[in-house]
Image: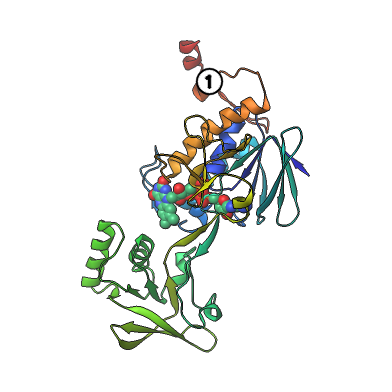
Amino acid sequence: MIKTDILIIGAGPTGLFAVFEAGLLKLKCHILDALPQPGGQLSELYPKKPIYDIPGFPDILAGDLVDNLMEQIKQFEPGFTLGERAETIDKQEDGTFIVTSNKGKKFHAPVVAIAGGLGSFEPRKPLIEDIEFYEDKGIKYFIKNPEKYRNKRVVISGGGDSALDWSIFLSNVASEVTLIHRRNEFRGALDSVEKVQELKNSGKIKMITPGEVVGLNGAEHLESVDVDIEGAHRNIPTDYFIPLFGLTPKLGPIGDWGLEIEKNAIKVNNSLDYQTNIPGIFAIGDVNTYPGKLKLILCGFHEATLMCQAAYQIINPGKKYVMKYTTVSGVDGFDGTRKEAPKAVVKAIT
Ligand SMILES: Cc1cc2nc3c(=O)[nH]c(=O)nc-3n(C[C@H](O)[C@H](O)[C@H](O)COP(=O)(O)OP(=O)(O)OC[C@H]3O[C@@H](n4cnc5c(N)ncnc54)[C@H](O)[C@@H]3O)c2cc1C
């Protein structure tokens, strides 16, 4: 049994930053994630994409943000259990919780913070015969490492941001990019649509609209796709077919924990601390919902911060906590490290 102060379910940016904020309050965290690596959507869906709305970073690659968060929390020595899914939760008589993973591992904590994001990632798959046969033999639903596609022929289908953004990105990597969408209009950001149009005009990508991939060919590996273009059929030789039709959000087992759920998200009390209808269980980041909710990384950071303050009160009932700036108090890592507050600042404020 692993014992900790806060069990965090989900190692996305929200869960990772919660470790830092908890550490400032001298609370220990253990993180459980179904994926084999930390970072949530950032590592799984777009590690090589720049993010432009992280305060203080004019731009930062998603993968680098995850690396930075891991570096920032190292001093608080969080425990990690990766590649295991939180399956069940049992409330104990003393109000604490025991969470059990799908592999039978048990975690005991007075506070559980669900930072499960979209839940388990389930790509929307097109209904094409034999599609399962070609999975990992030329069909990909996520792009993890764009280098895999260097000098390869790629067919992307979809009409949203992912399809547009990856077509733009891979136009500089792949030997040939063909973007296929079943309508003439795209749903993505206007500047991405314009960029794709420019790339098409300059011959850097091919575009087929309206069109739909309806058949897959190849003996051992995908060799070509059949496209229906308003009733006419065309065969396009390709090494990879990447249907980017979005993800079906699935809360998974957490959906059966007795939490109030609204549209696949966990309802929380946003005016205070992101606590759910079960005291001691919090939901932070993309997984929660409340009036005005924005699914953004920086909002997850904020929610994690307030959640930790409330967790402190549950773990240390009646103990008063006075918030101090890190510039004033410094940071005492659990690993014995100390980041000193600058002396001049301490003097000016105390
Ligand atoms: C293509 C794309 C581009 C984006 N660009 C931006 C941007 O520019 N700026 C921005 O602010 N946001 C952006 N976002 C949104 C941003 O990625 C999310 O807001 C952010 O990832 C939410 O973080 P999170 O930690 O709450 O959840 P997630 O990142 O989704 O992480 C949740 C983790 O929980 C785990 N998990 C779920 N259920 C369980 C379970 N039962 N047991 C164990 N583990 C579980 C999952 O495996 C996952 O690792 C983008 C999203 C996408 C898809």
| Residue 192 vs residue 127, the one in the foreground | 127
- Extreme-right residue of the structure: 1
Q: Quadrant of the N terminus?
A: top right
**Residue 84 relative to residue 58: left or right:** right
Q: Tell me what residue is drawn at x 58 percent, y 48 percent.
A: 11
Residue 149 is situated, as x and y percent measured from the top left of the image, at 44, 71
Q: Specify whether residue 6 is in view.
A: yes
Where 109 falls versus 62 (above or below)?
above
Q: Specify whether residue 33 is in view.
A: no
Is the residue indicated by label 1 positioned so its CB lies within 8 Å of ligand 1? no
- Going by the numbered disc 1, the residue's amino acid type is Lys
Residue 253 is situated, as x and y percent measured from the top left of the image, at 63, 54
| Residue 230 vs residue 58, the one in the foreground | 230
Secondary structure, mark 1, is loop
Q: Tell me what residue is drawn at x 23 percent, y 62 percent.
A: 194
Residue 204 is situated, as x and y percent measured from the top left of the image, at 28, 72
Q: Tell me what residue is drawn at x 45 percent, y 11 percent.
A: 348
Residue 264 is situated, as x and y percent measured from the top left of the image, at 51, 52
Q: Which residue is mark 1?
A: 324
| Res. 334 image quadrant | top right
**Residue 170 relative to residue 87: left or right:** left
**Residue 215 relative to residue 87: left or right:** left
Q: Tell me what residue is drawn at x 56 percent, y 43 percent.
A: 15
Where 43 falls versus 337 (above or below)?
below
**Residue 62 relative to residue 96: left or right:** left
How packed is label 1: few (under 14 Cα within 10 Å), some, or many (20 or more)? few
Where 13 falls versus 158 (above or below)?
above
